[in-house]
Amino acid sequence: MRLSSIRPHISGALLLLLLMWENGACVPRCLMKDGGCQKVLSWVFNKTSTTSETINHLSSEILNEFDAQYDPGQKFQNRPTMSCHTESRSIPNNKRKAQRMEPGALLKVTIRILAAWKNLLYHVENNMAHLNETPYATTSKVALIDGQIKRLTKDLKGIKTILSQVHPELKENENYPAWSGEPYVQQSQRRIQLFGLHSLFFCLHRDAQRVSDFVSILRHQIVPNK
C-alpha cells in the first residue's frame, strides 16, 4: 500500500511519520493523540497482510511447480517429509492456539519463524545449481519470497517497536540463529537431494501459511475493526 492511496485528510505529522517508515528510517514515537498510533499500525498491517499473503501464494506455486517437474509420480508426496527446521513447541500449530496467545508473544513467534528462513535464496540456488533444467520460474519466485520475507520482517519489527512504547518488555532483543540449510540440503545422492528440496519447499509453504494466519490474527488483536 503506497502513501499516495492514503486519504487526504490525514494529518501532516502522521504523514511525515509514515514517510519515514516507508523510506527505512528508524521508527519514531508515534502520536498518542487522536489515535495516531492506531492509524500507523493500521497502515502497516495493511502492508504486512498483503506481503504475507503474497509469500503464501508464491510458496504454494513453488512447491507445486517443483513437484510437477521433479516428482511427476508424486512419490515424495506419499512419504513423510523431513522434519522442518522450524519445528518448535513454542510455535502454535493451529489458529485456535495462536488466537489464545498474547499479541506480543505471537508477534515474537512470527518474527522468529521469518528469521529462521533467512538466506533462503542462497540455500535454494546453491542446491538447485547442480540439477538439470533448473526451472527459472522457480528460482525467480524464490528470489521474490526472499525479498518479501525481509520486507515483512522489517515491518513486523517496526510494529514491535511501536508496541514497546506501551509494553517495555517487547524491547528485549532476541538472537535469531543463522540457518545452515539443514536438514534438507547438502545431500550428495540426486534422489535424496530432490526429496530434500521438496521437503524444504513443503516446510516453506507450511510456515508461510502460519505466518499469514498469525499476521491476520495480530491485525485483529492490535487494530480491531480495521
Image (spheres, rainbow, N blue to C red):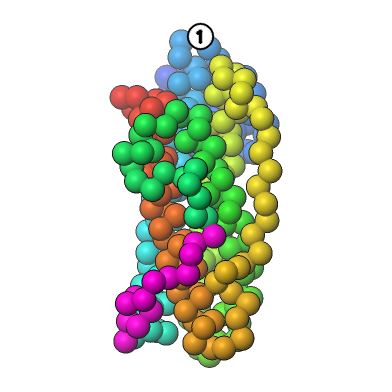
Q: Main secondary structure of the magenta part?
A: loop
- The answer to whether 125 appears left or right of 45 in the picture is right
Q: Which residue is mark 1?
A: 33
Foreground pick, 99 / 132: 99
For the image, the number of numbered tags is 1
Magenta stretch?
73-85
In the rendered image, which quarter contains the C terminus? Answer: top left
Of all residues, the one furthest to the top in this rendering is 33
| Rendered view: 70 above or below 105 | below
Q: Is residue 151 visible?
A: no
Residue at 38% of width from left, 67% of height from top? 61
Q: Is residue 154 visible?
A: yes
Residue at 56% of width from left, 45% of height from top? 112
- Quarter of the view holding residue 183: bottom right
Of all residues, the one furthest to the front in this rendering is 89
Q: Is residue 74 magenta?
A: yes
In the rendered image, which quarter contains the N terminus? Answer: top left
